[in-house]
Image: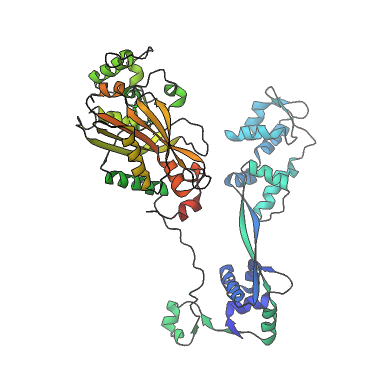
Amino acid sequence: MKLPDAQVAVLETASADDAQTIDDIADATGHKPETITGAAFDLEEQGLVAVESATEEAVELTDEGRQYLDEGLPEVRLYEAALDLGADESPVQMGQAIGASGLEGQEVDIALSNYARKGYGSIDSGEITADADADSETDPEVAALTVLSAGDADVDDDTLDRLDSRGLVERSERTVRSVRLTDDGVTALMEGVEATESVGQLTPEMLTSGEWRDVEFSEYNVEADAAEVGGGKEHILRQTANRVKDVLVGMGFEEMEGPHVDADFWINDCLFMPQDHPARTHWDRFAMDQPREIDELPEDLVDRVEDAHRNGVGPDGDGYHSPWDEDFARALALRGHTTSLSTRYLSGEQVGELEPPQRFFSVEKVYRNDTLDPTHLLEFFQIEGWVMAEDLSVRDLMGTFEEFYAQFGITDLEYKPHYNPYTEPSFELFGTHPETGELIEVGNSGIFREEMLAPLGVEDADVMAWGLSLERLLMLIYGFEDIRDVHGTLCDLELLRDTEVMY
Ligand code: PHE
């Protein structure tokens, strides 16, 4: 039987009794491991060998691990410095020991937190002892770092866990393939295999020497697995944001823009949010320190908003019987919702007076001091929108949502009455998660109340409005369960790479 050179090498090196790893065969034959892997898979296809895969833990030193291997672990350096200063059961001054050890910054904390645990001595009220029985030469963690740096993995689990939790090693898994001869492989070897002089790649040297005329080229295997190329692509969140924009533009909306950092006036006061509302306390918002206040606010609008807060709007109106302070309204913060853009547009501040009918939207980031969990992040994208027209009702709002969500294949919206200081009526929207079947909240909405609209100067039209979560929409479309799968350091790369674009 004639086979390409590398395949012959694998056949002749492999055994029927013991599986041999690709690396071993590569070492034994002088071929590259990737050549041997390719040859092994070709032979497996012909039934001459079996290829087995196993996962093996690989452990590598981190930069910090390598640094300690060179300079010594901080606690060992501290121990040795303390010994040099004459410490034993009777202590020496800690400051002196640290100075003599040469430890700096964080290393000092690291040394202190490991010192007693490892039996080097004790630390008490600024003094440090050194246990004469401790032996820094045989520190198990140092020994393990040495063994690991030599490429060996023969380290006990407890020490390895400890090094891992100290961030001195990084563990990873790798696939180890090994090859074993099959019965057919043994038969083929007995009958005799010979290497063909086949060449996998044409080189410039072959062309100049004319050698190409005499060699036999290996055949193309068009069925072979090709290497996967992970090209760059648009993030699914950005893709969906763009799709949302297209859909809303298609529904006749114009896009709003405005600052991420804004005055509380635009974020809250213009929304008839009382200044003592719980959402306005410092632990719910990200306040700005520099600069602390907005430069300018339209004074007559400020007066009207203050009046609405104090006295209400209309003959039967009633205000909040709580303080209203302009300085509080001028304070800058990262916006907790993009409804700040809606107030800027409705008031005429952004693009001048608007005559009904009008439709506006934005798909922009908002910032909230929430607790991170599978459905909450400190920042997310809000799909804000509003329609200004005469005689709007909740049916118009629901109809708009049905039309919008249907573009994304979502047709089972549910609504729940809700409360916002700035809308009446108000309701939350829910959709069903395609994997878990749970109802998840996707947005909040309502019809802006007079107390909000009148000060902004919107007198003879209704305005219906909403804030929807882009990430929750994504969950309904793509079925992932943790918002952190698409954002931040914990994101699920496979999901981001493999998610099909849906249109
Ligand atoms: N601002 C609301 C939120 O962030 C959303 C909303 C906007 C509700 C407009 C009603 C009207 O939840």
Image height of 436 relative to 459, above or below: below
Measured as percent of width and height from the top left, residue 467 is found at: 37, 35
Residue sitting at 62 percent across and 70 percent down? 26
Q: How many marks?
A: 0
Query: Where residue 392 appears, x then y in whole percent?
Result: 28, 32
Q: Quarter-wise, where is residue 162 in the image?
A: top right
Q: Is residue 117 above or below residue 283?
A: below
- Asked if residue 36 is positioned above or below residue 490 in the image, the reply reads below
Q: Give the quarter of the image for residue 184.
A: bottom right
Q: Quadrant of ligand 1?
A: top left
Q: Which quadrant holds the C terminus?
A: bottom left
Quadrant that contains the N terminus? bottom right
Q: Is residue 296 visible?
A: no
Q: Is residue 211 visible?
A: yes
Q: Residue at x 19, y 29 (%)?
A: 353
Of residues 297 and 141, which is closer to you in this image? Answer: 297
Indicate left or right for 119 with 475 as reference.
right
Residue ranking furthest to the right: 133
As rendered, which of 44 and 79 lies closer to the eye? 44
Residue 142: x and y in percent read 69, 45
Q: Quadrant of residue 361?
A: top left
- Above or below, comparing residue 114 to residue 169 in the picture: above
Front-most of residues 46 and 38: 46
Residue 334 x/y as whole percent: 38, 30
Q: Say left or right for 337 vs 145.
A: left
99 with respect to 295 (left or right): right
